[in-house]
């Protein structure tokens, strides 16, 4: 189900399939590259918009999850919605049965608020390493990130930035990302569309053998990650 959240400045479309923000416009300008299907190496891939990466961000070598987890591929239940907000829930599958994932989106005059809440109601401890994956519309892949020198030629390999918040300019828009439980930003594009992803993550790529920074969510424990995208 698609839900339109709109005010005097912001217009976004949220799809309950994957809790996917398919479009994000500010004063009639695209902030996100709209979700599209693009041919990549003879395969059709979803690109654009913003989707959650949970339980894990990127590759998984320690469990049996797909890259970026299962949340983006499953239907969320809509718990509540209004003109400027929507609240959704996904029940975990596989090894995550009993783990509940809540995602909410809310807009105000120039901000998109995102909240992810993970509650472990199961009887086992489970690893998590969540993130959000926004595709910012960026002509000529020209992105200026405050405090960092970005080598455009390395964007396809992913550039990881240690930061709790970030400011950048894309398409002459000043954009900032801040929140809670954000410590690494992944900056990436595959150069198949006019987008550059600036992805707020908790611990980056952590579902990898030999890594010690994966978060273990205990029984009856709750984890929260908040992301605020502000346009000016």
Image (cartoon, grey):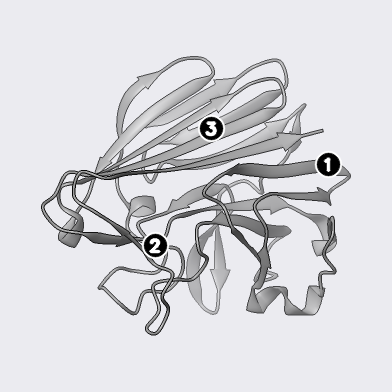
Q: Secondary structure at mark 2?
A: loop
Label 1 CA crowd tier, 10 Å (few <14, some 14–19, many 20+): some
Query: Which residue is the site of mark 3?
Result: 13
User: Quadrant where the N terminus lies?
Assistant: top left
Name the residue rendered at 70%, 60% in the picture: 196
Percent x, y for residue 118? 32, 44
Residue 56's label in the rendered image is 2
Residue 128 falls in image quadrant: bottom left
Is residue 188 among what the camera can see? no
Residues at circles 1 and 2 in contact by the CB criterion of under 8 Å: no
Q: Is residue 36 left or right of residue 64?
A: right
SS at mark 3 in the image: strand
Can you give x and y, in whole percent of width and height, for residue 136 in the image?
69, 51
The alpha-carbon separation of the residues under discs 3 and 1 comes to: 21 Å
Q: Nearer the viewer, mark 3 or mark 1?
A: 1
Which residue is rendered at x = 73% and y = 59% of the image? 194
Q: Which residue is mark 1?
A: 174
Q: Give the structural element (helix, strand or loop) at label 1.
A: strand
Residue drawn at (36%, 74%) of the image: 60
Residue 40 vertical position relative to residue 137 in the rendered view, above or below: below
What whole-number distance in Å separates the C-alpha atoms at marks 1 and 2? 29 Å
């Amino acid at each position: 189900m698609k839900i339109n959240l709109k005010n005097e400045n912001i217009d976004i479309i949220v799809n309950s399939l994957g809790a996917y923000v398919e479009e994000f416009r500010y004063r009639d300008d695209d902030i996100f590259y709209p979700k599209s299907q693009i041919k990549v190496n003879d395969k059709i891939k979803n690109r654009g918009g913003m989707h959650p990466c949970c339980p894990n961000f990127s590759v998984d070598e320690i469990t049996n999850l797909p890259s970026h987890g299962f949340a983006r591929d499953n239907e969320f239940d809509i718990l509540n919605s209004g003109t400027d907000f929507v609240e959704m829930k996904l029940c975990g599958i596989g090894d995550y049965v009993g783990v509940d994932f809540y995602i909410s989106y809310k807009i105000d005059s120039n901000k998109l608020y995102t909240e992810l809440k993970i509650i472990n109601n199961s009887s086992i401890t489970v690893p998590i390493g969540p993130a959000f994956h926004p595709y910012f519309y960026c002509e000529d892949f020209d992105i200026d990130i405050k405090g960092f020198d970005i080598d455009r030629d390395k964007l396809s390999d992913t550039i990881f930035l240690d930061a709790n918040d970030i400011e950048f300019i894309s398409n002459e828009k000043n954009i900032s990302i801040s929140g809670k439980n954000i410590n690494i930003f992944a900056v990436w594009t595959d150069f198949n569309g006019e987008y550059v992803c600036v992805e707020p993550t908790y611990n980056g790529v952590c579902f990898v053998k030999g890594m010690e920074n994966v978060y273990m969510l205990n029984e009856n424990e709750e984890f929260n990650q908040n992301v605020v995208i502000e346009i000016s």
